[in-house]
Every structure is written in structure tokens, then in C-alpha cells.
Amino acid sequence: MGIAKYEIFGTEGTWRVRHDGKAENEYATKEAAFEAAIAAASIALRQGHDVTVTAPASETATGAPAL
């Protein structure tokens, strides 16, 4: 099987997941994009693919704005 790569990218309020060169859906939070990527990665893993998920770091542990 192949490699399934999921890359989370964006800015506040507009996050996307790139897979196979496409980033079709838009998410309000980085966490929502991450959950979507993990769901897709889980299916790919079950199908026998190697899986990589990457996401940018946040300024805080939760991704919430720093006070």
C-alpha cells in the first residue's frame, strides 16, 4: 500500500487539511481540522497505508488564544 499524508494548515478561523494535493474542506478551528484528519487517517490505516499527520504548534497547549 501507499503512504497517506495529512497536513493541517491555515490561520485563525480558516483551517484546512491537505491530502493528495487537495484541501477541499474548511474548518473553524485547528482542532476540528485535526479531528477530520484523524478520522480519514484511521480509514487509511485500516486499508493498510502508512499514515502521517502533521499540524502546526499552538502558542498555548490547547490552541486557545494566550491571555
Image (tube, helix red, strand yellow):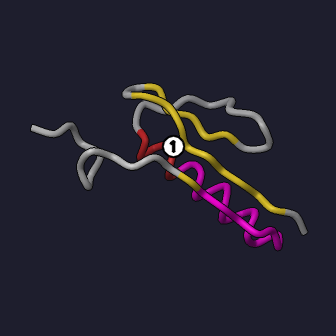
Residue 46 in the magenta stretch? The answer is yes
Of 43 and 1, the residue lying toward us: 1
**Residue positioned 70% across, 65% down in the render:** 51
Main secondary-structure element of the magenta-colored stretch: helix
Q: Which residues are magenta?
A: 36-53
Where residue 34 sits: x, y (%)?
50, 50
Q: Image check: 20 left or right of 10?
A: right
The crowd level at tag 1 (other Cα within 10 Å; few <14, some 14-19, many 20+) is many
Where residue 7 sits: x, y (%)?
61, 46
Image quarter of residue 44: bottom right
Q: Residue furthest left?
A: 67
Q: Image check: 55 left or right of 41?
A: left
Query: Is the N terminus in the top left, top right, bottom left or bottom right quadrant?
Result: bottom right
Of 63 and 24, the residue lying toward us: 63
> Does 62 sit above or below residue 64?
below
Where residue 25 sits: x, y (%)?
62, 31
Image quarter of residue 28: top left
> Does 9 sit above or below residue 53?
above
Residue 66 in the magenta stretch? The answer is no
Q: Image check: 54 left or right of 20?
A: left
**Residue positioned 60% across, 57% down in the render:** 53
Identify residue for label 1: 33
Where residue 46 sits: x, y (%)?
75, 72
**Residue positioned 51% across, 43% down in the render:** 33
Query: Is the C terminus in the top left, top right, bottom left or bottom right quadrant?
Result: top left
Amino acid type of the residue tagged 1 in the rendering? Ala
Give the SS element for disc 1.
helix
